[in-house]
Image (spheres, grey):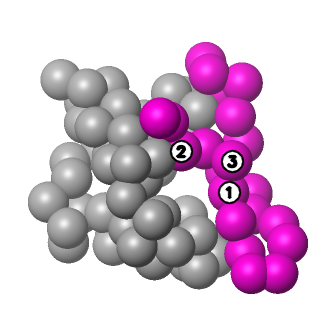
Amino acid sequence: MTRAEVERFLIAGGEDKVFRTKYNLIEGMDDFVGAATADGYDFTADELLAVLKEAGDVFESSGNPRSRTIWWT
């Protein structure tokens, strides 16, 4: 179930530019997962990292403006 929550979150970011931009601006993992929890998603940092690792993605952001390559379309 939690994997499904992470996937739902990553797909939402892939489909919604405003959503994606909001999360791309958050630097720390704890703040990132806290914001996701406040938005109704239920997963931990470890669960997010496990799904990202399996997909070959990394949490780190880069560029100006900040961006992550974790979002699914």
Q: Which residues are magenta?
A: 53-73
Where's residue 25, x and y in %? 59, 79
Crowd rating for badge 1 (residues with CA inside 10 Å; few <14, some 14–19, many 20+): some
Q: Which secondary structure lies at badge 2?
A: loop
Quadrant position of the N terminus in the picture? top left
Residue at image location 35% in from the left, 32% down from the top: 7
Where's residue 54, x and y in %? 61, 18
Where's residue 58, x and y in %? 72, 42
Judged left or right of residue 49, residue 39 is left
Crowd rating for badge 3 (residues with CA inside 10 Å; few <14, some 14–19, many 20+): few
Picture layout, residue 8 above or below residue 64 = above
**Residue 20 in magenta stretch:** no
Give the spatial CA distance, label 3 vs label 2. 6 Å
Residue at image location 46% in from the left, 47% down from the top: 14
- Mark 3 residue type: Thr
Q: Which secondary structure lies at badge 1?
A: loop
Q: Are marks 1 and 2 in contact (CB under 8 Å)?
A: yes
Kindly report the secondary structure that dominates the magenta region of the rendered protein.
Answer: loop
Q: Which secondary structure lies at badge 3?
A: loop
- Mark 1 residue type: Arg
List the residue tagged with mark 2: 71
Residue at image location 56% in from the left, 38% down from the top: 49
| Label disc, if present, on residue 68 of the rendered structure | 1
| Label disc, if present, on residue 25 of the rendered structure | none
Answer yes or no: is residue 22 visible: yes
Give the spatial CA distance, label 1 vs label 2. 7 Å
List the residue tagged with mark 3: 69
**Residue 57 in magenta stretch:** yes
Q: Are marks 3 and 2 in contact (CB under 8 Å)?
A: yes
